[in-house]
Image (cartoon, rainbow, N blue to C red):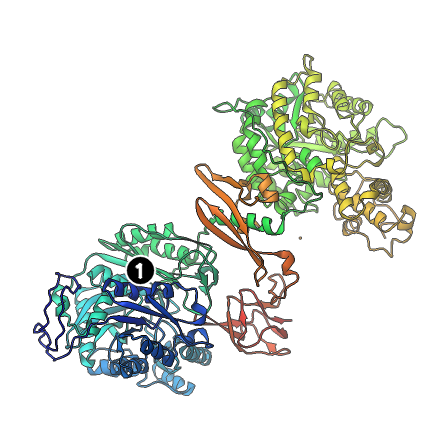
Amino acid sequence: MLKFRTVHGGLRLLGIRRTSTAPAASPNVRRLEYKPIKKVMVANRGEIAIRVFRACTELGIRTVAIYSEQDTGQMHRQKADEAYLIGRGLAPVQAYLHIPDIIKVAKENNVDAVHPGYGFLSERADFAQACQDAGVRFIGPSPEVVRKMGDKVEARAIAIAAGVPVVPGTDAPITSLHEAHEFSNTYGFPIIFKAAYGGGGRGMRVVHSYEELEENYTRAYSEALAAFGNGALFVEKFIEKPRHIEVQILGDQYGNILHLYERDCSIQRRHQKVVEIAPAAHLDPQLRTRLTSDSVKLAKQVGYENAGTVEFLVDRHGKHYFIEVNSRLQVEHTVTEEITDVDLVHAQIHVAEGRSLPDLGLRQENIRINGCAIQCRVTTEDPARSFQPDTGRIEVFRSGEGMGIRLDNASAFQGAVISPHYDSLLVKVIAHGKDHPTAATKMSRALAEFRVRGVKTNIAFLQNVLNNQQFLAGTVDTQFIDENPELFQLRPAQNRAQKLLHYLGHVMVNGPTTPIPVKASPSPTDPVVPAVPIGPPPAGFRDILLREGPEGFARAVRNHPGLLLMDTTFRDAHQSLLATRVRTHDLKKIAPYVAHNFSKLFSMENWGGATFDVAMRFLYECPWRRLQELRELIPNIPFQMLLRGANAVGYTNYPDNVVFKFCEVAKENGMDVFRVFDSLNYLPNMLLGMEAAGSAGGVVEAAISYTGDVADPSRTKYSLQYYMGLAEELVRAGTHILCIKDMAGLLKPTACTMLVSSLRDRFPDLPLHIHTHDTSGAGVAAMLACAQAGADVVDVAADSMSGMTSQPSMGALVACTRGTPLDTEVPMERVFDYSEYWEGARGLYAAFDCTATMKSGNSDVYENEIPGGQYTNLHFQAHSMGLGSKFKEVKKAYVEANQMLGDLIKVTPSSKIVGDLAQFMVQNGLSRAEAEAQAEELSFPRSVVEFLQGYIGVPHGGFPEPFRSKDFTATFGPLDSLNTRLFLQGPKIAEEFEVELERGKTLHIKALAVSDLNRAGQRQVFFELNGQLRSILVKDTQAMKEMHFHPKALKDVKGQIGAPMPGKVIDIKVVAGAKVAKGQPLCVLSAMKMETVVTSPMEGTVRKVHVTKDMTLEGDDLILEIE
């Protein structure tokens, strides 16, 4: 006799003796032999294989895994006691469908039983029969029951015979498209095709019209054939907006059948379940009774053994329809286990051993619902791209865990490679709580803890589902996803740490991301930030501006007794000396010191001009964010920007509304003073900028660009009268402050006295602001002369950032005016500390420092009139173009080019035009006479041509005759968190450093190693991040040039059609030269057993097809071109 005892509600067998007598507990007694199972093979892969292995280990059973050639690195083969390769040389899916290989492995390794898992061969009667014929037990129903239930047409007939309601449909698999036509004529649309020999959404297509019938029939047949080895389909009427309710059943070999209540699987996309819930929320108790009793009735009708699921559709009126039986364990069996405390895999194995359900303590009256469980299928699919499967290497994996959370996974670990060959399921997350809201809360928390990097996932989408009120209310149906488009409003993951590692790895492999003019390494020493007192900074001129507005601010400036200073260190100084390369990171470090110690400044120039161009193109920063962050750190000092009139911060004219909106947003984000200028002093452009700045509520500082020499009577084009006339127009236009912008440093002390005194006499109540560069070395003398002649404000830079092509020294002006009526009231010791910081910071930018190619200022600026900011850039450009040894010739050509263009006022963008022409002349060995003589034949630089076409305005005196006849943070994260040496050079191997992402969030990083080149042209870069090993793959750009890769579709080239997802080409529907219509199918891709039809986005002719059948593609690989 069998001697055993059971723990109440449990499944564990405590004592067994072999016998041939059936237990007396069953009312339906058959004499069967109990045969314990000692070794189980799982004919599957991934998480379900591991799920079964774990159950076997708990029962003391040895485990065997099988794996395909593509699955050598998969976790399921490592979790088993033994693992064997199958399907050598076969396609990935076909390997797991190859019955002879699987049976051979089972027999050769003394396997007692085979568990089929779900998918693959789990519902193939021939596989169950093959196991039985080989003397190996099949953990599932008998082959005959698998056949009957697997054939959905026969299953329908059995349901009808059992008195279970069914959806109208065909009685047998259809064999032609014509039969589908006949069915739709009888029952109308919509209809649905279903694979006759499998489920999981494969081979399932909904058809709403005759026009869709043929294509969907073909796709459904193809998918069913690929997934189940048989393309047979049947057709049924499609019930709109039903709930999808399924009932878990369990039977033994003695005729005992019970149910374990229902699951709601209504949340689906492409007929694949996304979220499953047990029990179904708000299900009428009478309906629950009908569903469960019909399920048991159907199972008894067919003599069902082992675990299975009976699936129903429930319409809006509470009427239920049988749709199919899944004669296997379901993906979502987990939620049933959680609410019933029944281990279904244990039960499956025990039943296969010959145990009865009562033996296991399983009686219907003992099965109770305990709380609610929710399962979310986390997949490697991109919801933003119609759930297209993503593939690649998981760089980071961190799961959500804790009380009430269960995880079933296989490939979810750092370093795992997600291939396009199999299902996209990454991990099943199961939450269990006392009720639906509690389980949902636990699930939301767990999903929020997940970190998956390297492949796209649907986690953000699942979070939206869990936060949806309809879901929380438990009123979902199968159209839930389609009818809630807000589910696709996905909040992007920050992924800051991994993005930074990608950037550092990229620099370590490929070098700096920003062009480096000269070979000079950043200083190894970080600049020292002076001490900053605790508390808010003292009041400054911005407090006056906020209190009294632009007019009151201007009055306060004019009434101020001493000389006011504007600090250009945060913009123009580093534009002139360091090619505008100073990063927000280094500006923010010294900003609090400035706020606390330089509250007497008129303003700080920290934005506008080249800041936008360089920040986005070379520093990979957001200039708006720079403004916002500096404003927060320096609340008391006015900010000043350079606005190029109608050009705003660009190099060409913009529509008026763009300039107005730009100024409005700049003011909202912290800008105060707008220095408005035009490179040609073209009044219409300036007036537009002034009006825009004024309308935004900013202080308008109209700037007259200075050139020539008003003290030289022979220079008549730009005379004193010219500047006075311009000033009259600007004052009449309502400027708050008048500025003289001497961008080349041409103002000599005598000219300063003449011009400034004349302006002061003419406009006694208007603040005057003077800007110059110290290229000649006379900048301090010139600014002192301006101050003595009546200027209110002059521009200076921190001592270590002054001189040469920058502004005059702040310390020099402070010292020279101390104790005089012009005293700046700026403490000298603060100037010294400020300069010391910038001396250290400047060393970080050694590769951009103008001193790499020029050692001093030069008085020849009075001759060539090259602006300070351009002088440095022109020098670097000349070296990069191979003209470094000819810079003297470039400067001479600059003079000639200026005269050719009509003696321009030279400031961005006009200065660039002159510089482009000068380098063009030197490069081509042209004199002024030769260039003018050959003007019609030469291909001049584009900037020159556009100037002559009037793109930037009309120069003073007209045009000369006859000469006239292109997103990184998304890839590389918050780079402003990196110090400048790391940003430019990357870390050294074994170097440890910290990166502060935000207050209270600091990354500790150590660079470990860089691997050799792999076959894909990549190098693996290894880091330690917060004590955990991380690695990223970086393309070696130099090596890639020497390797052949499939071309990518360029998104900005119309007619280039790229692969919407990685996958295999299974059908090509067009050839070169074919005419195609918009929406016409071009080819079919298959990935993770799901087929996608690529359609034409336009009408045209196929110019070239770049793919062949069976070719494997990556995302965005070029498929074909249409013209």
Relative to 459, residue 636 above or below = above
Task: Judge by depth and name the residue closer to the eye, 2 or 874.
Answer: 2
- In the rendered image, the quadrant that contains the C terminus is bottom right
Q: Between 1084 and 886, which is closer to the camera in this rendering? A: 886
Residue 67, position in %: x, y?
A: 40, 70
- Height in image: 1118 above or below 505? below
| Viewer-proximal residue among 1046 and 249 | 1046
Residue located 51% across and 51% down the image: 1022
The percent coordinates of residue 932 (x first, y second) are 89, 50
Quadrant in the picture for residue 61? bottom left
Q: Label 1 sits on what residue type?
A: Gln
- Quarter of the picture containing the N terminus is bottom left
User: Looking at the picture, how far across and down is residue 132, in whole percent?
Assistant: 27, 81
Q: Describe residue 997's horizontal placement relative to residue 583 as left or right.
A: left
Query: Residue 875 at what x, y percent from top left?
Result: 77, 41
**Among the 4 quarters of the image, the one containing residue 918:** top right
494 or 506, which lies in front? 506
Element class at badge 1: strand
- From this view, report whether residue 1058 is shown above or below residue 708: below
The residue singled out by tag 1 in the image is 375
Horizontal side, residue 844 vs residue 668: left or right = right
